[in-house]
Amino acid sequence: MNEVVREVYTPGASYVQARPDAAPTATDALHAYLEACVEFVRENPRGLAALGEIIAGARSTDGTHRYASPDSATVTSVEAIRRHGRDHGEFR
């Protein structure tokens, strides 16, 4: 199970993160991030379907969701773009 998560999530995170990192503005970074997400989903439907099933059902020994985290790479990436845009006057 962990191997499937690594095999799908790791390349996906690398693919998606590379795009906004190269963008000149926060607005461009957000667009690049969203476009990369959509492209990765379109190109990897079976792997992402499996990943979704695993993430939705996987539990730790205490019963909590095993992969749920407010500090996930997705949340952290979008928050960094938002913060940069706000700090530089692009976003409110």
Image: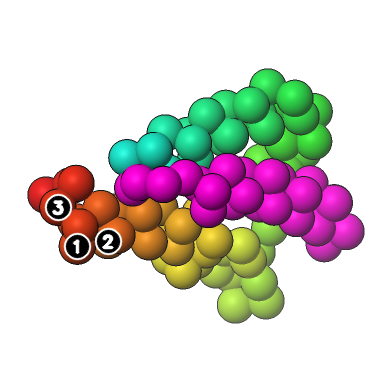
Q: How many numbered marks are there?
A: 3
Q: Nearer the viewer, residue 1 or 85?
A: 85
Q: Quadrant of the image for the N terminus? A: bottom right
Structural distance between the alpha carbons of marks 1 and 3: 6 Å
Residue 91 in view here: yes
Residue drawn at (47%, 45%), measured in percent from left and top? 23
- Tell me which segment is drawn in magenta: 1-26
Residue type at the position of mark 1: Asp
Asked if disc 2 and disc 3 are in contact, CB closer than 8 Å, the reply is: no
Q: Disc 2 marks which residue?
A: 83
Q: Disc 1 marks which residue?
A: 87
Residue 89's tag is 3
Q: Quadrant of residue 50?
A: top right
Residue type at the position of mark 2: Arg
Residue 5 in view here: no
SS type, badge 2:
helix
SS type, badge 1:
helix
**Closer to the eye: label 2 or 3:** 3
Residue drawn at (54%, 61%), measured in percent from left and top? 73
Q: First in sequence, mark 2 or 3: give its number.
A: 2
SS type, badge 3:
loop
Asked if residue 9 is among those painted magenta in the image, a careful observer would answer yes
